[in-house]
Every structure is written in C-alpha cells, then in structure tokens.
C-alpha cells in the first residue's frame, strides 16, 4: 500500500504538475517527480489504475457502514529477515558511476541515466525549459533520423524511452529485449549526442503543457498541493507553478541551451539491470560519455546545491489558506518542514509518520477520521525527505459540510503525537516498516533507483544494513520529542480547498487567508 501511494501520485499528477510521495521505510525520500509516459509504459499505468480501483472504491461511500476497529486489534505479525541485494558499482569516469544488478529471469535490459540537479536549480525565469527538454527527448529525432523515423525504429525494436524530472534530478531511461538492446542503446546515445529537436515537436509539447496548466484547477488534490508548495516555498522554483506565459517563452534555442548547460555540469548516475551480460554495454556507455561535453565542474546536489527554503518570517505559518472553488468535496492538508533524508531524526519521523497516517487502516488518522467517524473519503500522512530538506503532511478529503470538523481532528491527532505515543504503538509501526522492506526488493530497477537516491542524498554506504537497527533504536520519547520540535501548532501550514461557505467555520480554528483557485 505504501509503495502504491507513491506510484499512484506519479500517475495521477500529469507532467508539468507537482507531485508528492508518501511511503514508509527507507525509500520515502524521493522528491516530487514528474513522469512523462511513452507507449512502453502503458502496461505499468494500467496495473496501477487497477490498484486505484481497489483502493479508492472502498472509501467512497462514507455514509455506509464503517469498519469494526476491533478486527485490527491484537494482530501479531512476526518479524521478517532480509538481506539487501548487492549492487555492483564502478566509476566509468570522474563524473559518471555505473550501478549494475544482473537478473536473467527475463530477457529484458533496462537502463536509466540519472543526472543530478533537477528543477530546484531552474530559475523562475527559465521555468518549463527542463520539462520541455525531457518531453522532446522522447518525441524528437536524432542525427539524420526524423522524429517519425526515430519512433518507427524504436517501435520495430519493441523499445521504449522515457524521461522524468524531479526536484533533485532529471533522467532518461531505456528498456528493450536483450537481443534488441544494443541497437536501441545506439539510438539513445544518438539522441543524447545529436538531438534533432524540431519546431513541430516543440509545438506539440507546448500544447500539452498548456492543456495541463489549464486543467490544474479541476481536482482539489492538485490545487491543494500546488498551493502548499507556493506557501511553503515562496520565491523559489519549487514553489512556483508554471504559467502559460512561461510556456510561451520556451523556444528551440532555450531548450538547446538548457541541454548544453545541463550536460556541461552533469554528474551521471547510470543504472543497468536485467539480462545484460555479454552485450558490451559498459564500453558503449564509456564511448557515449566521450561524445558528450566533459563537465568542467560536475554538479552534485550536496553540499552546495541542496534546496534551501526561504528564510525569515512566512505570513502563512499558523494560518489556514482557504482556496475557494466549486468542488464536490474538500481537501485538507496540514504540513510542516521537518528534516532531510540524512538527518538523525529521519528514522524517528518515519516511525512517527507510520503511527500518524502512513500505516493505512492501522494509522490514527484513518482510524479516528474514517473508520470510527466516517468523516472522510481518505486520511493519511507522508514524510517526504530529500537531500537537504523535508516535510511531513497530513492529508484528508471529505464532504465540505464536515471539513472543519475533520480538520480539527487532524490537528488533534498531530498534537496527540507529542504526548500519547507508547511502546505498543512503536512496536507495531516498527514491525510493519521492517516487514515491508522485503517487498521493496522484488524489482531490480527500483532497487537501483533507490541506491542512486541514497548516493545523491549522501546516505552512509551501509545505509540499508543500518536501517533496521536505527529503526529498532527509536523510542516513544524520541517520537514525541521530534513532533514537538518539528510540528509546532503555531507554525503549521494549513491548506483547505473547498467552497467559500467553509470560511466562517475555519475561522474558529485559525486565522484564514482566502484565495481563489487558479492555474
């Protein structure tokens, strides 16, 4: 369920929209990620869509019978032992590292090229160029191949190229059957070294971006998280929602300049998994790096390029930002900055988040708000930590006439974490988190993705081996102290998306700043 939520957000939020992640365990640290899908990813999207039907169908009828919470009491799940699979890593150059995980279960090979320095390093004036670059790398030609010819070649090989942009990185990926992978890799290398961006492809990308911008106000959750970013991170690219005027400034020249500037400062992390032995891929990658610009000073997220939230007083702290609109339900978000992935309190916040709302139906938010009272369609929390910063958020969607009541309960649950956490709470959360680790190792691509994230976030080399013991060392007192430190009631960011009629009731909870929903 925890990994499902992470993946669903990536699909639910289209490209050019901010995303959020809320998973437990050591892998929740992935910053917001925008994924641009190509045909090859349809099967994955379909699988997650099926999961969405299973997950979201249950909470929709909030006036029906609620679950009996006694069913969950007394459940004892024995601890499971696991050993993280070894990842073979080697330097291809002073600025590029290859991470390999062989798996010959299927005759498929997958490659991901992750480059440090994502959207956080894009200026507001250049907003959208990195997204446009990522989209064009999927839809353009290369060398003497037109866009149509490139698409045809990839289709004949049964290969797919995908790109994505996150706060900390941007990446391009390739997957193909083993026998076709060498030829598909040559196409990818050609795309990176001799891209043939054309105006027609850019026009299509810009139209898609504009369409996505115009649809941002359709769903309360999209509106809510965009507004949360804007109030928590003002005057930064992370807090800035790209506008149609920004799309209009994007040109072939600005995209080409973006690519060249990014490659001139690139720090590459290259993940290779599947049945790749005997294909000579490492040599091809070294040859590719020789064709690309040699970075004069390879950029890394840490220590010099880690995201820094604006300092000084923030007018939105401790207040409710009420975003008004004609929505059939209301979205509630309560959030606060916490800690980075490599901070000592990371393990404490992971356990605390699981108890509060990261544990699905066993968590306090779900039990108190949905199961016992039937107030909400859903209620959960997530702890999102990156290389240099992080935040915890509690989220719920409910009928608008119960929004104020639900928000009050959410705030009570957060306050309760500062006083009422006992050994049984911690034990249940610890067991659930540690047992979930076993299921996070069934996908080599995900294992390598997490391994790269650990490198970028400067986690210890034996982080995964340390993780269970670090989690076991957390006490109830640690959790209470952490919530007292990072979630002060007067410093919380509260975003409510719902009709204007909510304002009067919300003012009984905290001062209200009203805004209209806008793209």
Image (spheres, grey):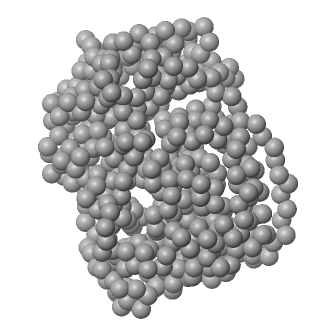
In the image, taking residue 518 as reference, residue 351 lies left or right, namely right
| 393 relative to 315, above or below | above
Q: Quadrant of residue 288?
A: top left
Residue that appears at 39% across and 62% down: 225
Residue that appears at 67% across and 23% down: 103
Q: Quadrant of the C terminus?
A: bottom left
Residue that appears at 43% across and 27% down: 268
- 11 or 195, which is in the foreground? 195
Q: Is residue 322 visible?
A: yes
| 327 relative to 89, above or below | below
Q: Position of residue 9 (x, y in %)?
A: 48, 53
For the image shown, how many numbered marks are present on the structure? 0
In the image, taking residue 388 as reference, residue 201 lies left or right, namely left
- 46 or 461, which is in the foreground? 461
- 33 or 31, which is in the foreground? 31
In the image, taking residue 270 as reference, residue 293 lies left or right, namely left
Residue that appears at 67% across and 41% down: 464
Q: Quadrant of residue 484?
A: bottom right
Q: Quadrant of the N terminus?
A: bottom right
Q: Position of residue 378 (x, y in %)?
A: 56, 69
Q: Is residue 263 visible?
A: no
Q: Position of residue 124 (x, y in %)?
A: 22, 50
Q: Position of residue 28 (x, y in %)?
A: 56, 51
| 418 relative to 308, above or below | below
């Amino acid at each position: 369920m925890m990994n499902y939520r992470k993946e669903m957000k990536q699909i639910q939020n289209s490209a050019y929209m901010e995303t959020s992640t809320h998973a437990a365990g050591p892998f929740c640290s992935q910053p917001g990620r925008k994924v641009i899908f190509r045909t090859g990813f349809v099967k994955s999207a379909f699988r997650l869509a099926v999961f969405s039907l299973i997950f979201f169908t249950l909470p929709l009828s909030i006036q029906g019978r609620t679950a009996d919470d006694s069913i969950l009491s007394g459940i004892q799940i024995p601890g499971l032992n696991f050993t993280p699979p070894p990842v073979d890593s080697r330097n291809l150059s002073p600025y590029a590292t290859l991470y390999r995980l062989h798996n010959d279960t299927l005759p498929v090979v997958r490659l991901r090229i992750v480059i440090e320095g994502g959207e956080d390093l894009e200026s507001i004036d250049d907003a959208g160029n990195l997204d446009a670059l990522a989209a064009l790398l999927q839809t353009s030609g290369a060398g003497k191949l037109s866009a149509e010819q490139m698409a045809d070649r990839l289709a004949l090989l049964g290969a797919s190229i995908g790109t994505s942009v996150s706060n900390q990185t941007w990446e391009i990926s390739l997957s193909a059957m083993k026998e076709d992978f060498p030829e598909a890799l040559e196409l990818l290398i050609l795309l990176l070294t001799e891209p043939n961006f054309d105006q027609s492809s850019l026009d299509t990308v810009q139209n898609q971006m504009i369409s996505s911008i115009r649809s941002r106000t359709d769903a309360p959750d999209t509106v809510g998280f965009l507004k949360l970013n804007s109030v928590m991170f003002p005057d930064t690219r992370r807090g800035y929602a790209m506008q149609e005027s920004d799309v209009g400034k994007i040109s072939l020249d600005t995209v080409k300049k973006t690519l060249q500037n990014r490659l001139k400062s690139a720090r590459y992390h290259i993940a290779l998994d599947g049945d790749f032995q005997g294909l000579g891929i490492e040599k091809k990658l070294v040859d590719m790096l020789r064709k690309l610009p040699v970075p004069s000073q390879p950029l890394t997220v840490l220590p010099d390029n880690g995201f820094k939230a604006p300092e000084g007083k923030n007018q939105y702290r401790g207040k409710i930002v009420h975003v008004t609109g004609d929505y059939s339900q209301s979205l509630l978000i309560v959030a606060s900055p916490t800690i980075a992935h490599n901070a000592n309190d990371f393990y404490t916040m992971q356990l605390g988040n699981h108890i509060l709302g990261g544990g699905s139906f066993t968590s306090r938010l779900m039990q108190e708000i949905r199961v016992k009272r039937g107030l909400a369609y859903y209620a959960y929390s997530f702890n999102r930590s990156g290389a240099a910063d992080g935040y915890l958020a509690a989220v719920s969607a409910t009928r608008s006439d119960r929004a104020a009541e639900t928000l009050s309960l959410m705030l009570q649950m957060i306050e309760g974490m500062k006083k009422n956490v006992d050994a049984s709470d911690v034990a249940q959360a610890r067991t659930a988190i540690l047992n979930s680790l076993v299921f996070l190792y069934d996908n080599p691509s995900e294992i390598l993705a997490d391994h790269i994230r650990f490198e970028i976030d400067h986690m210890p080399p034996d982080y995964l081996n340390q993780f269970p013991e670090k989690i076991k060392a957390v006490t109830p007192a640690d959790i209470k102290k952490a919530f007292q430190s990072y979630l002060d009631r007067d410093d919380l960011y509260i975003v409510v998306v719902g009709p204007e009629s909510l304002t009067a009731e919300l003012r009984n909870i905290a001062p209200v700043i009203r805004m209209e929903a806008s793209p």
